[in-house]
Amino acid sequence: MVLQDGPLRSAFERDTKGIIKQEFITYVIKGNQLVKETVVRKFSPGGDYTDSTYFEPLVEVKDEVK
């Protein structure tokens, strides 16, 4: 996937000087659960970083009764 020009691409390509932490959040339905997926990048003073991913089930999603 290639990111098109826009705010998301700018956020990914920006200079990281002075940045402490970045988060990218996605809400997705997996099975019968609405899940919040968060990818976090924490920056160290030397320019290194650590990435983590968190999954948080939010609510059960039920099919509509027809």
Image (cartoon, rainbow, N blue to C red):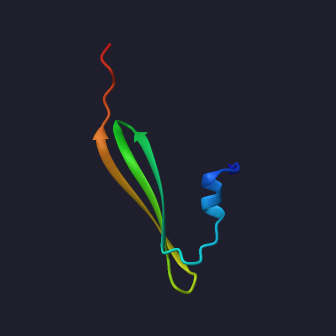
The residue located at (53%, 76%) in the rendering is 49
Judged from this view, the residue extending furthest toward the top is 66
Place residue 16 in its image quadrant.
bottom right
> Quick one: quadrant of the C terminus?
top left
Judged from this view, the residue extending furthest toward the bottom is 46
Q: How many marks?
A: 0
Report the side of 51 relative to 13 (left or right): left
* Residue nearest the observer in this picture, 14 or 24: 14
The residue located at (65%, 55%) in the rendering is 9
The residue located at (42%, 52%) in the rendering is 37
Place residue 48 in its image quadrant.
bottom right
The residue located at (34%, 36%) in the rendering is 32
Vertical comparison of 9 with 44: above or below: above
* Residue nearest the observer in this picture, 31 or 35: 35
Q: Position of residue 23 (x, y in %)?
A: 47, 61
Report the side of 13 relative to 55 (left or right): right
Q: Position of residue 4 (x, y in %)?
A: 70, 48
